[in-house]
């Protein structure tokens, strides 16, 4: 009985194994096809993922290239505009010079004042007993030289005052932007609270904006009334930020730091060149000091220079050579930063 049961169990086991083998033989191809299909599906998914990554990378590269090209085109356009403005800044018309100097007189009134200055200087020379040949020169100097020198002096002093206050104004705008205020409010704050001449320059920006001009265009006009590179830097930063985007507060903060560094460099260069300037002043004053001492000690020895035509010719030639030397020394000790 036990042997029969063992035989039956072995038979059942063999039958099961045979059935499994037959089923595996029939299902093998299907299982292999499913595995191959799974592998192909995984390959396709990985390829699609790789293509997505490559496409995203290409899109980012193309976007960066478009943005870089936009910035380059903007810089090129701004550079061309800046060259035109620089030409106007180097040799501006008299009307623009008066505005840059902060003067409110008209062209006609300026010419009137120039004529009166020339006549007054000529009359003073005539009363002082100068030779008649020098009176036309005094008229030219009084009518053309002194008024324009005064305008240049006012321009330089106004630019100096602007550069002393401009970095502080930029810091105020940076804090306003970081606190959430728009750029318009920061500019209006400077136009109302800053010291002159920064207040008047930003007031022009606000007035231009009220007339319908955009802030970048209004800021780009600042160098027309404030002839310094720093005003042009501010306009370029605003223009680029408007066209290409970016962190405005960071850009203005960097500009403020650059302006302060330029100011420190100018002060350092001025300190290093003071010795050369003092030497130039001493050399330039030495002929007058020697002439005065000689006149005090022996007037008859030096008077032929002023009383004879030969002496006047020598004085004229000496004055020309001395003027050339002073201009050369001035060019040597003046550094652009």
Image: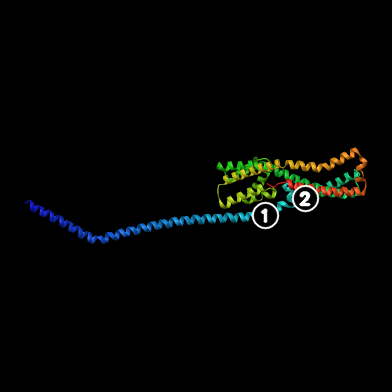
Location of mark 2 (residue): 107
Taking the spot 70% from the left edge, 54% from the top edge, the residue there is 87
The percent position of residue 72, horizontal first and vertical second, equals 59, 55
Whole-Å distance between the Cαs marked 1 and 2?
26 Å
Taking the spot 33% from the left edge, 58% from the top edge, the residue there is 39
Nearest the viewer among 278 and 124 is 278
- On the picture, is 120 further left or further right than 24? right
Occupied quadrant, residue 294: top right
* SS for callout 2: helix
* SS for callout 1: helix
Work out which residue is located at the far top of the displayed protein and give it.
297
Occupied quadrant, residue 249: top right
Nearest the viewer among 151 and 15 is 15
The percent position of residue 286, horizontal first and vertical second, equals 82, 41
- Nearer to us of marks 1 and 2 is 1
- On the picture, is 141 further left or further right than 60? right
Please tell me which of labels 1 and 2 falls first in the chain.
1
Question: Can residue 213 be seen in this snapshot?
Answer: no
Question: Can residue 216 be seen in this snapshot?
Answer: yes
- On the picture, is 262 further left or further right than 314? left
Location of mark 1 (residue): 83
Occupied quadrant, residue 74: bottom right
């Amino acid at each position: 009985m036990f042997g029969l049961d063992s035989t039956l169990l072995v038979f059942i086991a063999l039958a099961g194994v045979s059935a499994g083998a037959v089923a595996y033989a029939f299902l093998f191809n299907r299982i292999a096809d499913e595995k191959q299909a799974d592998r192909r599906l995984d390959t396709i998914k990985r390829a699609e993922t790789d293509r997505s990554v490559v496409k995203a990378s290409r899109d980012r590269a193309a976007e960066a290239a478009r943005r870089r090209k936009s910035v380059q085109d903007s810089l090129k356009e701004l550079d061309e505009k800046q060259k035109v403005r620089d030409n106007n800044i180097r040799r501006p018309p008299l009307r623009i010079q008066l505005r840059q100097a902060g003067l409110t007189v008209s062209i006609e009134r300026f010419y009137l004042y120039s004529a009166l200055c020339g006549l007054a200087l000529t009359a003073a020379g005539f009363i002082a007993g100068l030779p008649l040949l020098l009176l036309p020169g005094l008229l030219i100097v009084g009518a053309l030289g002194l008024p324009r020198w005064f305008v240049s002096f006012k321009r330089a002093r106004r630019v100096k005052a602007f550069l002393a206050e401009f970095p502080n104004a930029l810091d105020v705008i940076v804090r306003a932007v970081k606190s959430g205020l728009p750029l318009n409010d920061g500019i209006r704050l400077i136009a109302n609270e800053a010291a002159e001449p920064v207040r008047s320059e930003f007031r022009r920006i606000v007035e231009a904006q009220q007339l319908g001009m955009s802030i970048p265009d209004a800021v780009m006009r600042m160098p027309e009334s404030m002839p310094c590179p720093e005003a042009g830097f501010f306009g370029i930063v605003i223009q680029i930020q408007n066209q290409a985007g970016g962190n405005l507060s960071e850009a203005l903060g960097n500009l403020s730091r650059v302006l302060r560094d330029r100011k420190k460099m100018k002060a350092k260069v001025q300190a290093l060149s003071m010795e050369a300037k003092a030497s130039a002043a001493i050399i330039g004053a030495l002929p007058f000091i020697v002439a005065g001492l000689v006149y005090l000690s022996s007037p008859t020895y030096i008077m032929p220079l002023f009383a004879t035509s030969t002496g006047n010719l020598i004085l004229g030639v000496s004055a020309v050579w001395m003027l050339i030397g002073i201009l050369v020394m001035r060019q040597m000790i003046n550094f652009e930063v």
